[in-house]
Image: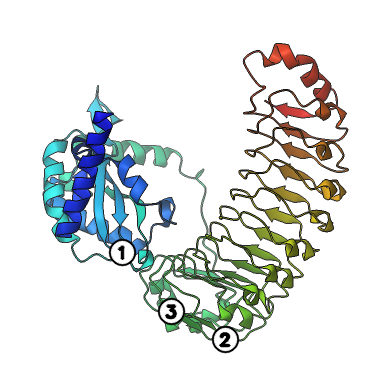
Amino acid sequence: MLLDMKIVLTFALLLLTRYASAQLVVLSEKESVKKNLTVKELDKQYPEGQELGLEVPRSIYDAIRNALDVVMGPKKVEKLTVASSLYLNNEGKIDYLIYNFGGNMWVVENGKAVLRKPDFNQDSLSRIISENLPAQLAGFISKRHIGEKSKLNLYSNFTISASELKSKAVAQNDSIVGSMLSKLKGTEKVIVKKDSVIKGLDAALASVDTLKIKTLYLERALLKSVPDVIYRFPNLEMLSLLDNDLEEVNINMSRLPKLKHLNLSGNILSENSIKISSNKTLQLLNLQRNIIHDIPFAVKNCKKLETLWLGRNKLSALSDRSFGKMKRLRDLNLYKARIASLPGGVKKMRRLEVLDLYYNNLEKLPGSVTKLKRLTHLAVANNQLTVLPEKLNKLKRLNVLYAHHNHLSKLPANIVKLNNLLILDLGFNWFTDFPSELTRFASLQDLDLSSNNFTEFPVELLSVQRLNKLFLRGNPFLQDDREVKYGPQFSQLKSKNIEVFY
């Protein structure tokens, strides 16, 4: 108890010291443990950001890598990876940067090149980084993260490519790889680039036959504005500006009369900074991972838009009006968008077929969801739902319902009238009594009841007539003696060609 109190007090003291000096703290993971400033403790103060893995914006990745490159200088080793955890405050500045080393390098053993962990003085390199990196990152600000604390993980890779610096092992490995490729010559898969596709700003500027270009990728190009070069390609059907630093866009669709897909994900766009002129061609608009709070008005200028992806934004300003003028929409992705309440106006999207509400903060769904008569896929998993809408049976075309990781303990009685339901996932909920409705579905193929609170085998399952897969893992009744205790029941289910996972 005293030790725990000491750790808490030490952590609090470090926090107060940092705020008093407003100085970026850089520590190796080893150093952070010594100071009781562990990643575990920091993670409690700084929630994980919206970016995953390779989605870390290039401008942030470059800023950290370049700073490390300058600081380490000639001390870099071959095949070194520096893994960094950035803890950002609500001004978008780094409070803490905790790092460690990884990666592999080639060494010679018995005349052969083999991979081993880098062999170098980690304490010495750590001291150089911890002492000098704060000055290199003093002016760093991430506009994407202003307004709330967050955490980012990224990996900076360093490879010595100059031939005079390569070790004997690396040189030998290059020779081995070269020899292998030589032997495989004529059998390797040849990747042919389509003439209608351009990747990169330089290639777009250099293109001569612009009329044949249908796809243009200007991704991770550190763009701060949309380049006019996009209008060189009047037959463009797909434009991706993913992971740039765009704070506003203004797309003149009259100059791109055939554009069907527009990807603006991973930028710094708000709902008011997106301008797309009125059009009848755009079918898919990807606005994921921006700083959008409401459905942009620009969406309503896209008269034939069918797919809208708004996942991993901060949709805190949704209202009934948000869903107007989107009558043609078929696929709406609101994944991990921090939605606490879904407005009833969602019913306006009468043609909607797919609604993704994964990982939000919903405690209930509006009854108006049942007005979406064309809905085939409904994903409400990873919320805090305690009930599903009573009139869910009105969704007569529903094929798939993902409702796992909620707080459900009962089902609406009429759910059995979903005659086209094929997949029902109710795993990781709060069911203690088996819902009798589950035995009466006409077409159900997959049923997932994993990790609920069934203390005994649900005998009602034996009356199920049609089912392909049944998932029961993680329930309390599945103890070490399950094969002996419930063997006859499992055999009876399998005799009906039901594959049981337990």
Q: Residue at x 50, y 84 (%)?
A: 231
Q: Answer above or below: position of 298 versus 361.
A: below
Dot placed on the residue nearer the N-terminal end, 1 or 3: 1
In x, y percent, where is residue 298? 57, 81
Q: CA distance from mark 1 to mark 3?
A: 19 Å
Q: Answer above or below: position of 499 versus 354.
A: above
Question: The residue tagged with tag 2: helix, strand or loop?
Answer: loop
Question: The residue tagged with tag 3: helix, strand or loop?
Answer: loop
Which residue is the site of mark 3?
Answer: 248
Closer to the eye: label 1 or 3: 1
Picture quadrant of residue 296 = bottom right
Picture quadrant of residue 286 = bottom right
Dot placed on the residue nearer the N-terminal end, 3 or 2: 3
Left or right position of 216 against 80: right
Question: The residue tagged with tag 1: helix, strand or loop?
Answer: loop
**Other-residue count near label 1 (Cα within 10 Å), few / some / many at <14 / 14–19 / ≥20:** some
Q: Residue at x 81, y 38 (%)?
A: 438
Residue farthest along the top direction in this orientation: 484
Residues at circles 1 and 3 in contact by the CB criterion of under 8 Å? no
Which residue is the site of mark 2?
Answer: 277
| Quadrant location, the N terminus | top left
Residue type at mark 3: give it. Answer: Glu
